[in-house]
Amino acid sequence: IRLYQGPANAGNMRAQVNLATILLESGKDPSPGVGSNVGWLRRASDQGSALAKFFLAICLLEGRGAAKNEVEGFRYCKEAADAGFPRAQGLLGELYLSGTGTARNPEQAARWYREAAAWGDTVAMFRLAGMYYEGVGVNKDVSEAYYWAVLAEATEPVEETRGMRAGIGQQLNEQQRKAAERRAQDWKPKTMPL
């Protein structure tokens, strides 16, 4: 902790984020205010750190180190997502789908899930499969649902993703399944530039 305190106090954004995450993970948050995990996250966020905005959103949404404030948590999550932070994009999809901190908006949820899925976010792929299957926030499209289920299973082959792929796949003929599988084979996740 001491290693980061000097640079954090001097305004080093990375040190502020690192110090905040150490305090969050250790449970050693000295006090509310500027020297707390949330205080460091706010300072780094004010300097434009998307990572700090994401962690601050989580703290506010869960009431960790600060009073629970879903509206403010949503705002910080949106700022991080708008800045291109993939984990924030997936969380923003969840917030729009559930109506946490904002009005429920399945169309916006689908938009942000697509953004997160483009980076390889399995949960976003899984949610998109369900949304296309049910027609929530998007036009119902069982072939598109199967495509997202195939991608979700490919990135994380667990019982839930396998089950979703199998269940949706039963709704399609062999030609439709093969077309979606070929499309999924050609998919590549976005990568961060060096």
Image (cartoon, rainbow, N blue to C red):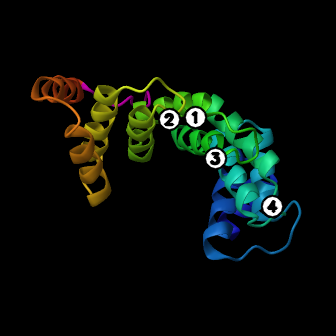
Closer to the N terminus: mark 4 or mark 1? 4
Q: Is residue 35 left or right of residue 28?
A: right
* SS class, disc 3: helix
Task: Pick whichever, 27 or 61, lies toward us.
Answer: 61
Give the mark, 2 or 4, whose residue is nearer the N terminus: 4
The first of marks 3 and 4 along the sequence is 4
Closer to us: mark 3 or mark 4? 3
Q: What is the CA distance from the residue labelled 1 to the residue labelled 2? A: 6 Å
Residue highlighted by disc 4:
68
Q: Give the residue displayed 66% in from the left and 53% down from the top.
A: 55
Foreground pick, 165 / 16: 165
**Circle 1 is placed at which residue position?**
109
Assess whether mark 2 and mark 1 are in contact (beta carbons under 8 angstroms): yes
Residue indicated by mark 2:
113
Q: Which residue type carries mark 1?
A: Ala
Question: Which residue is painted at 82% across and 63% down in the image?
Answer: 66
Depth-wise, is mark 4 or mark 1 nearer the camera? Answer: 1
In the displayed structure, 127 sits above or below 114; it is below
Q: Which residues, given as a range, are shown in magenta?
A: 187-194
Determine whether the residue tagged by mark 2 lies in a helix, strand or loop.
helix
Instruction: Read off the residue under disc 3.
Output: 98
Quarter-wise, where is residue 3 in the image? bottom right
Lower position in the chain sequence, tag 3 or tag 1: 3
Tell me the kind of residue under disc 3. Ser
